[in-house]
Amino acid sequence: MDMRRAKIVKNVSVTIGAWLVALLIFFPIFWMVLTSLKTELNAFSTPPSLFFMPTLENYLVVFERSDYLKYFWNSVVISFGSSIIGMLIAVPGAYAMAFYPTARTKDLLLWMLSTKMLPPVGVLVPIYLLFRDTHLLDSKIGLVIIFTLINLPIIIWMVYTYFREVPKDILEAVRMDGAHVWGEIRHVLLPISLGGLSSTFLLSLILSWNEAFWSLNLTTSSAAPLTALIASYSSPEGLFWAKLSAASTLAVAPILIFGWISQKQLVRGLTFGAVK
């Protein structure tokens, strides 16, 4: 009886703790949406007001003055373009390292991962000059290239991990039946690793969608994504909190909805191989 009661208390404690953590994580999003429905005067009020007359004025201003759809389309093209190209490069690279490793494979993987620890500002000047000389400044192609390069180490690592979990006996059986490398990847490896590959693509998409440093430094207007739109509401005259919150809500809403719809696929891919 005591053990049963202790188990119930443990389960209730874990549930309450999980809800508290979830509320803590989602509170900034809730507050951002709440602020976007206030007037600029209410947004600055101290103490903050929880009860007010909601207004959609800030969203109308963002749509009418900021050309939201252009920024949204730039984000879609840049995020999907860099993620697709990253996957096309990562799959054959991870396949070679997972099934035909050499003595330097581990060193190569660690070196790729170490590049993620480099502060972006440390390479800003040479990349900016390179983009200027190749006329890639303020272009979607330029951002697709830079986003692909900065996310490629994580993509290759994740795909490599999923490929390592595939039993080699299955591939050997396919080879004995006469399958070539492409047939092996297309008909066996990709279907088995579909969950992992999908979660890798989604993670790359989210990272590209949220990236702001390179967007702000390599674009001005033509290829600027939604992260640049948010930054535009910070001006020398001050911050327009309500409009900034409305622009931020419109920027994160598409990727939140996309992540919510694909959450089962994402969780299944991230836990692929965790339990044998």
Image (cartoon, rainbow, N blue to C red):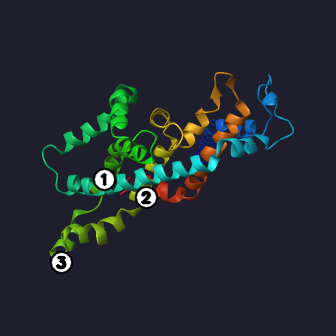
Q: In the image, what residue occupies the spot 16% across and 51% down? A: 101
- Report, in whole angstroms, how far the alpha carbon at label 3 lies from the one at label 2: 28 Å
Mark 3 neighbour density, 10 Å: few (under 14) some (14–19) many (20 or more): few
Mark 2 neighbour density, 10 Å: few (under 14) some (14–19) many (20 or more): some
Asked which secondary structure carries label 2, the reply is: helix
Marks 3,2: beta carbons within 8 A:
no
Q: For the C terminus, which image quadrant?
A: bottom left
- Is residue 50 placed above or below 274 in the rendered structure? above
Disc 2 marks a residue whose amino acid type is: Ser
- Report, in whole angstroms, how far the alpha carbon at label 2 lies from the one at label 1: 13 Å
Label ID, residue 177: 3
The label nearer to you, 3 versus 2, is 2
Q: Pinpoint residue 99: horizontal percent, then vertical percent.
A: 20, 57
Q: In the image, what residue occupies the spot 52% across and 49% down? A: 74
Disc 1 marks a residue whose amino acid type is: Ala
Residue 1 seen in this snapshot: no
Q: Pinpoint residue 257: horizontal percent, then vertical percent.
A: 61, 54
